[in-house]
Image (tube, rainbow, N blue to C red):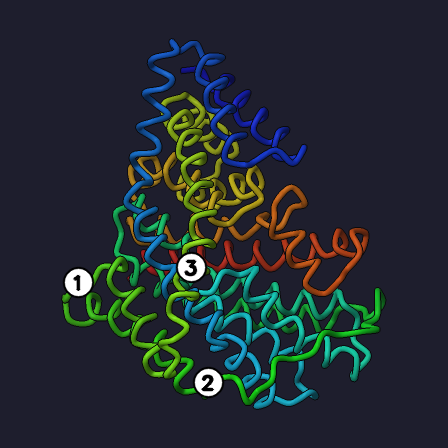
Amino acid sequence: MTAIGALIGLAISIILILKKYNAAYSLILGALVGGLAGGVSLPHTVELMVDGVKEVTPAIVRILTAGVLSGVLIQTGAASRIALSITRAFGEEKAFVALVLSTFLLTAIGVFIDVAVITVAPIALAIGQRMGFSKMRLLLAMVGGGKCGNIISPNPNTIIAAENFGAPLPSVMYVNFIPAVVGLIISVLLVKGMSNRGEPVTTCPEIEDEKLLPSFWSSVFGPLVTIALLALRPLFGIQIDPLVALPVGGLVGIVAMRRTRQLKESLVYGLEKMSVVAVLLIGTGTIAGIIKGSELKDVILAGLDALSIGRSFVAPVAGALMSAVTASTTAGATLASASFADVILAAGVSAVWGAAMVNSGATVLDHLPHGSFFHATGGAVEMSLRERLKLIGYESCIGGSLALLSLIGYFVATLF
């Protein structure tokens, strides 16, 4: 299949997504047109699309089970308790550090980044109103922390990248830890150095009554159990699949918080959030199958060779490009890992580092306006579209730093 055909398919998908058509259907239609435009017969095009979906199916199952932990954290108030505890520990004089760390920790333990921002937003707005901080600075702090946490979390983007590379999820999370920590420092410095001009905080929603929230230690107990189970493989060679570790952490957590009566609503919420991702991944899988069956990979490699850029750069570059196409960390990581995993592995990059660099690369442009993250986070602080657009460059700087730090980490690791 020609590279032009795959590019036509991608272009159609992007145009439809920009026009607010359903992302999954847009990707499926783009895949179908791309295969036909690339000179492949209709039956073969459908076969490539189905094969693409088959490759992401195991990850979809794991992502659906991850909804147990995510749903428990949100519906029981555990996420709110964690955020409140962190901001109180640091105090308002270190508000930006507290906000960055709050969203970092929430995403790192398995909460969706947009949900993490929405959870922390009422606290951020309350601080911003008292301290006179602009909405732009507050939102950048939350997004920066969320992006850093997202590259080391058992969230869908990390799961799908690890699955497509055949790498252990805990290892993919672990190798990006230092880039994530350095990214936190960069985020804090960027927010502190940012001008305070912009929309001021005039009103803020009521913060959830603390008396109704679980304790801090019971809130983090479930995520700690999940992390401990996932760590058994690299530490002791005992493999506990994320399909088991994530829901077990959620169930143990809800028992520790004594909120078992909220189990049903937590499961409903978690499945609802993950179902949206699962449907998106089906559409992403179809276009990934077309890209994988086309010459597009060869064209990209030829371009890198012409620019004298090593093929090790394919992983973060592919993640960044596909996040721009889909405006989604998860969809970007899916497209990049499903389409380029074999090329990246053939270049001598290990499966763990290939998945980690794709994952960090997918944070570079996942905040573009044709994605839901852009609008959900802007809405969380009631920010105007004009103001929200001004943050894109800052967000790209944080995502780009994470991708670069992950790449540096890979090169350092190859020396030892």
Q: Earlier in the sequence, mark 2 or mark 1?
A: 2
Of circles 1 and 3, the one toward us is 3
Q: Is residue 261 left or right of residue 370?
A: left
- The residue shown at (49%, 69%) is 74
For residue 410, above or below residue 204: above
Around disc 1, counting alpha carbons within 10 Å, would you say few (fewer than 14), some (14 to 19), or many (20 or more)?
some
Q: Which residue is mark 2?
A: 214
Name the one closer to the observer, 252 or 229.
252
Q: Which residue is mark 1?
A: 239
For residue 93, above or below residue 225: below
- Mark linked to residue 268: 3
Q: Quadrant of residue 47?
A: top left
In the rendered structure, which amino acid carries the disc numbered 1?
A: Gln
Name the one closer to the observer, 404 or 120.
120
Q: Quadrant of residue 345?
A: top left
- Mark linked to residue 11: none
Residue 86: percent from left, percent from top = 55, 84
- The residue shown at (75%, 77%) is 128
Around disc 3, counting alpha carbons within 10 Å, would you say few (fewer than 14), some (14 to 19), or many (20 or more)?
some
Q: Earlier in the sequence, mark 1 or mark 3?
A: 1
Name the one closer to the observer, 209 or 405.
209
Q: Quadrant of residue 208?
A: bottom right
Around disc 2, counting alpha carbons within 10 Å, would you say few (fewer than 14), some (14 to 19), or many (20 or more)?
many
For label 1, the SS is loop
Residue 158: percent from left, percent from top = 39, 55
Residue 252: percent from left, percent from top = 29, 76
**Mark pair 1, 3: CA separation:** 28 Å
Residue 274: percent from left, percent from top = 43, 52
In the rendered structure, which amino acid carries the disc numbered 3?
A: Val
Q: Earlier in the sequence, mark 2 or mark 3?
A: 2
For label 3, the SS is helix
Determine whether label 2 and label 3 are within 8 Å by CB: no
